[in-house]
Image (cartoon, helix red, strand yellow):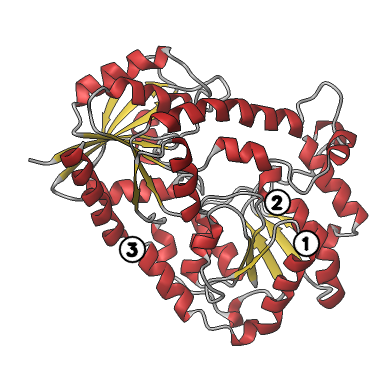
Amino acid sequence: MAMKVLWTANILFPEAKALLEGRKTDLASSGGWLVAAAEALASREDTQLHVACPAAVTSIRHLKGERIHFHLFPGLQSSGEPFYGDKPELDSVFRTLIDSVKPDIIDIHGSEYAHSLSCLRAAGDIPTVLTLQGFLHECAEHYHDGLSKWTILSHKRLFKKGILQEEDSFRSRGEVEKRLLSQVRHFIGRTEWDKACSLRFSPDADYHSCNESLRDAFYDGCWRWEDCRRHSIFISQGSYPLKGLHQLLKAMRGILDKYPDTLVCIGGAKITEGRKKHLSNYGRIIASMIRRYHLSEHILFTGALGTSEMKEQFLKANVFVCPSSIENSSNSLAEAQILGVPCVASRRGGTPTLIPNEQMGLLYDFNDTKALGRCICRVFESSDSFDNTQMRQMALERHDRRRNCEALVRIYNEIIKNG
């Protein structure tokens, strides 16, 4: 008899969205790894996968996909985001959902939202595991690293939400997250950092290691020096302080002294565009830095990127940079590595697990923007002789979908057996 697995997700899967709305959609970058993992698990004959997704519904809706059962629950705010904090009213929603599915095991993906805590409470005696993503309380601690309070406040519009208020929101939500982490008996993670963070709150819990699978498109293709744009930098996100765009702009002064044709391509919307009074606090800071450092000809915001467009940006770049103030395991970094793109990343959070040696990329201390510049220049200097064979081999092994799926099933069976 197939093992019945119930997942909770923070996103509405594309297949479920298509079934709900009658049209196909691309998930773009966020959550693609989760969809890939779900499809691998659901393809097994010994597993029946059910996924609970927050959606704009008034009651639980069951949708049967090609291989996955979707259970849409009313878990969205008016903004379209899942509820934050603790929402006890969701407990009864999950009790109903769990009673209808009758799973052998529940896998809660992420500790960020209210439905995670409600699902844990509603699970009762059913074996439950939390698959770690990021940590809100850690995000709060590092939210505006590299930016002084004077810089933040001097670029903030009166009566408009700014960076410090965003940080407070992370901190408040992080307090609820800590409660969740302290009640979990089993964790699934993938970095030394997430292991240390999770066991700090629940030291008697069992930690299980399982690497992630990536989106299908990234297993095919290889970066080539001959095909990239010389002296181009790609970062996948830059819309809020955690992603560290401001640190890269600081480093650009030194980079341009050696490579005056350097171009930075930033995934996502142009946060510096539009009337000044309508820009976000962070957008105003970035716009000011671009003016002050005379970078307008060296910055390009790509707009929202679908899977194929993201892959194209990786392959065109001379170097991929992950300048985040905190990351657990950046999916963009993993995607760059599996394509063989030269990588530079800040030595924060779980990133050192993904870059254990210089074949996998170069690490620098987040606050040392001169070191960031030196790393990028070092990549530019050596790109014509860069051999990405070992990088791609290690990344392919780490993100091997069959192996990771088998590891996940072993973990589930162990938890079910031992409780």
Q: Quick one: SS at disc 3?
A: loop
The amino acid pointed to by label 2 is Gly
SS of the residue at dot 1? helix
Please give left or right for residue 119 compared with residue 326 in the image. Answer: left
Q: Using the rendered view, name the quadrant where residue 403 is placed.
A: bottom left
Q: Choose between 66 and 350: the one closer to the eye.
A: 350
Q: Residue placed farthest to the bottom in the image?
A: 385
Do the numbered discs 2 and 3 sit on residues whose CB atoms are within 8 Å?
A: no
Residue lying at 28% horizontally and 17% vertically, measured from the top left:
95
Q: Which residue is mark 1?
A: 369
| Earlier sequence position, callout 1 versus callout 3 | 1
Q: Residues within 10 Å of mark 2 (few under 14, many from 20)?
A: many
Q: Quadrant of the C terminus?
A: top left
From where the camera sits, is residue 12 visible? yes
Decide: is 45 above or below 13. Answer: below
Mark 1 crowdedness (10 Å alpha carbons): few <14, some 14-19, many ≥20: many
275 in relation to 94, above or below: below
How far is mark 1 from mark 2, CA to CA? 11 Å
What is the CA distance from the residue labelled 2 to the residue labelled 3? 29 Å
Q: Which residue is mark 2?
A: 244
Q: Mark 1 or 2 closer to N-term?
A: 2
**N-terminal of the two: label 2 or label 3?**
2
Percent position (x, y) of residue 98?
25, 23
Q: Is residue 71 left or right of residue 243?
A: left
- Mark 1 or mark 3: which is in front? 1
Tag 1–tag 3 contact (CB < 8 Å)? no
Q: Which residue is mark 3?
A: 400
* Kind of residue indicated by mark 3: Asp
Could you tell me the amino acid type at mark 1?
A: Thr
For label 2, the SS is loop
| Camera-nearest label, 1 or 2 | 1
Residue 31 position in % (x across, y down): 46, 44
